[in-house]
Amino acid sequence: MFRTPLPVRSRAQQGRAACLAIAEAQDHVVARRQLAAHRIPRWVLQLELRARRWRRGGRQTVVVHNGPLSLQTRQTIAVFEVGSAAALDGVSALQRAGLKGLTDDHVVVSTPRGSTPQRPRGVVVKETRRFREHDVVIMSGIRCMRPAVAAVH
């Protein structure tokens, strides 16, 4: 039986495809720690950033397109930038859950008290001693407080 050869993909193409697969479920945002966990070389990231096909979301995130940022993309960036224990909270979490009619100029993120969160511009970071991991759910690839808890906050 004769088989047609599969196209050979370069390491850059393989790395790019892996990044896009990760970012697809996270509003086109990928965290640097995710790239490291999937062993995607830094030079692939630098290649895309220099070519201006992708852009930085912050110090810890990359957006895999160069267009305008949607609200969901800004929320995802905020959670990744604040820290690994962070979760979307308040009006931002309710918007993520699908509630219409509420607007807020800032993205609200909660972290446990005693953590050392980063404080990106445009993000309200709330350190709370009432942060419980069982109140956190994953919505669209990012950590969010359950809607009932977010409504109280």
Image: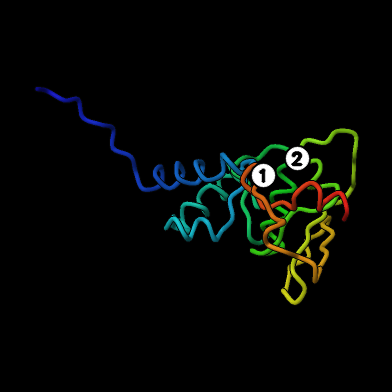
Give the mark, 2 or 1, whose residue is nearer the N terminus: 2
Picture quarter with the C terminus: bottom right
Q: Would you say the residues marked 2 and 1 are in contact, meaning their CB atoms lie under 8 Å apart?
A: yes
How many neighbours does mark 2 have within 10 angstroms: few (below 14), some (14-19), or many (20 or more)?
some
Return the x and y of residue 141 as percentages of the image width and height.
61, 46
Name the residue at the left extreme. 1
Return the residue found at the far bottom: 114
Q: Is residue 107 visible?
A: no
What label does residue 97 carry, if any?
A: 2
User: Can you say whether 140 is above or below 137 in the image?
Assistant: above
- The quadrant where residue 64 appears: top right
Q: Quadrant of residue 124?
A: bottom right
Residue 143 appears in the figure: yes
Binning the other alpha carbons within 10 Å of mark 1 as few (below 14), some (14 to 19) or many (20 upward) gives: some
What amino acid type should be assigned to the residue bearing mark 2? Answer: Ala
Residue 6 lies left or right of residue 133; in this view the side is left
For mark 1, what is the residue? 139
- Where 36 falls versus 48 (above or below)? below
Q: Which colour scheme is used?
A: rainbow
